[in-house]
Amino acid sequence: MYEKEVEERLIGHDAVLKHIRSAVSAGRVSHAYLVEGAEGAGKKTLAGQFAMALLCKAPENGEPCGRCDSCRVFLSGNHPDMHYIRPGEKGTLPVQRIREELVQDMEILPYYAGRKIYIVERAHLMNAQAQNALLKTIEEPPAYGVILLLAESVQSFLPTVRSRCVLLRLLPLPEEKVRKILTGRYGVEESTARACAALCGGSVGQALRLARSEDFIRLRERWMEWLSGLARQETWEVLARAKALEEDKAVIEDVLRMMQIWFRDLIILRETGSLSGCVCRDLDAKLESSANLYEIPELYRKIEVLEDAKKKLSHNVNYGLWSDWLLVELSRRKTFHQ
């Protein structure tokens, strides 16, 4: 089960996997790695696989054997030489935690294996003080220490830290490639594969999780149905949707992306007269009945509103006020066709 999950989450990242396998096989492992990739790209899966191989007593072709005592303890989640450092409740990685849980802890010899591995999740949240506390350990590490910094962007790191780490970059896969993998390798239905590929940010693992989620399928059905009738609603009717936005708060990013896809499809249909480039081709009748109810500039304006909505949401705005603002903007019309 573990091997299948790793394979799914790291599909498309063959070059990075080849690098770490070669490093393990040849015994040329660096003391610090910076793993960059978007949310859901597979950073934690990659780091876990790498760490398990480094701690394995008998790695095979650079991969963990999965059978030795070290691998079994690792899979139980209780390996004494495997350390995870995660942001606290406030979403920060303060300097004191880095000093205590990494810098000072690394001075203690490995307990079980020949190495000690430290995975720092969301390492881009470290401020300059925390990074400087880590710098000396990266510059002069003990031979047994390996640090894996997981980050959404390397730009938040000090140049002195970046230059001392090996960069492993998990690039997003093209949408069309994700779709083909879903349909060809995993037998996902075409319309579902298109929708999931458009929403997954280039991560096959994320796309598969969406495709296998009944909650996601129902979420898409609800919002596509609402969007198909949006052009015919008055503002007060649109504002009644605030309750649904509140109920779907935990998955609001997916909802916003669905909205963008819907309006993008309407633009494609209006400008080309064809559904061939649309993600929501399974909703052809709904797309066609909605497309002519909007002027093309209105549709581009909806896309801009949704981009603005994502930015506002990232700045911890009042969610209720934000919802009302979004719905008012989505209901705003230059013209209305009966």
Image (cartoon, rainbow, N blue to C red):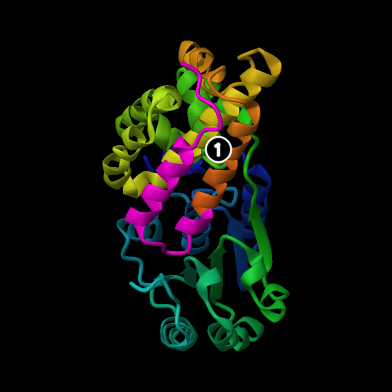
Q: Inspect this view and state whether residue 245 appears.
A: yes
Between 44 and 130, the one nearer to me in the picture: 130
x and y percentages locating residue 97 in the rendered image: 42, 83
Q: Position of residue 317 (x, y in %)?
A: 41, 62
- The residue tagged 1 is 302
State the image quarter where residue 141 is shown: bottom right
Q: Is residue 31 left or right of residue 73?
A: right
316 within the magenta span? yes
SS of the residue under disc 1? helix
At x 43%, y 88%, the residue is 96
Residue ID at (40%, 54%): 322
Image coordinates of residue 71 in percent, x first then y, are 40, 56
The answer to whether one can see residue 8 in this image is no
Give x and y (percent) for residue 271: 69, 20
109 sits left or right of 148 in the view: left
Task: Give the quarter of the image for residue 217.
Answer: top left
Q: Quadrant of residue 80?
A: bottom left
Q: Residue at x 53, y 20 (%)?
A: 293
- Would you say residue 167 sits in the magenta stretch? no
Up-down: is 177 above or below 245?
above
Quadrant showing the N terminus: top left
Depth check, front residue: 256 or 6: 256
Q: Which residues are drawn in magenta?
A: 311-338
| Foreground pick, 86 / 140 | 86
Q: Amino acid under label 1?
A: Lys
